[in-house]
Amino acid sequence: METATLVAIFISGLLVTFTGYALYTAFGQPSQ
Protein backbone atom coordinates (compact mmCIF):
# COMPACT_ATOMS: atom_id res chain seq x y z
CA MET A 1 0.00 0.00 0.00
CA GLU A 2 1.06 3.55 -0.57
CA THR A 3 1.54 5.97 2.28
CA ALA A 4 -1.13 8.28 0.88
CA THR A 5 -3.67 5.44 0.97
CA LEU A 6 -2.83 4.63 4.58
CA VAL A 7 -3.09 8.29 5.57
CA ALA A 8 -6.46 8.62 3.83
CA ILE A 9 -7.80 5.52 5.59
CA PHE A 10 -6.47 6.78 8.92
CA ILE A 11 -8.05 10.21 8.50
CA SER A 12 -11.41 8.81 7.44
CA GLY A 13 -11.33 6.49 10.44
CA LEU A 14 -10.66 9.45 12.70
CA LEU A 15 -13.54 11.36 11.13
CA VAL A 16 -15.92 8.44 11.64
CA THR A 17 -14.80 8.04 15.25
CA PHE A 18 -15.13 11.76 15.95
CA THR A 19 -18.57 11.94 14.33
CA GLY A 20 -19.79 8.91 16.27
CA TYR A 21 -18.45 10.37 19.51
CA ALA A 22 -20.07 13.74 18.83
CA LEU A 23 -23.42 12.10 18.07
CA TYR A 24 -23.08 9.99 21.22
CA THR A 25 -22.39 12.97 23.44
CA ALA A 26 -25.16 15.00 21.81
CA PHE A 27 -27.94 12.39 21.82
CA GLY A 28 -26.85 9.17 23.48
CA GLN A 29 -26.46 10.02 27.14
CA PRO A 30 -29.37 8.47 29.06
CA SER A 31 -27.96 9.43 32.45
CA GLN A 32 -30.26 12.01 33.94
Image: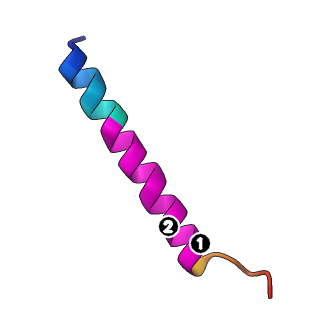
From the top left corner, tell me how far across and down residue 4 is, in percent: 19, 22
Residue plotted at (59% across, 72% down): 25
Residue segment shown in magenta: 11-26
Quadrant location of the C terminus? bottom right
Q: Is residue 14 left or right of residue 4?
A: right
From the top left corner, tell me how far across and down residue 28 is, in percent: 63, 75
> Which residue is the site of mark 2?
22
Q: Residue furthest top?
A: 1
Residue plotted at (53% across, 61% down): 21
Distance in Å between CA atoms under marks 2 and 1:
5 Å
**Label drawn at residue 10:** none
Look at the magenta stretch and give its main secondary structure.
helix
Question: Looking at the picture, which amino acid does disc 2 mark?
Answer: Ala
Dot 1: element? helix
Question: Looking at the picture, which amino acid does disc 1 mark?
Answer: Thr
Vertical arrangement, residue 5 with respect to residue 17, above or below: above
Q: Is residue 28 left or right of residue 6?
A: right
Label 1 neighbour load within 10 Å: few <14, some 14-19, many 20+? few
Asked if labels 1 and 2 touch by Cβ distance under 8 angstroms, the answer is yes
Dot 2: element? helix
Q: Is residue 14 left or right of residue 25?
A: left
Q: Residue furthest right?
A: 32
**Label drawn at residue 25:** 1
Label 2 neighbour load within 10 Å: few <14, some 14-19, many 20+? few
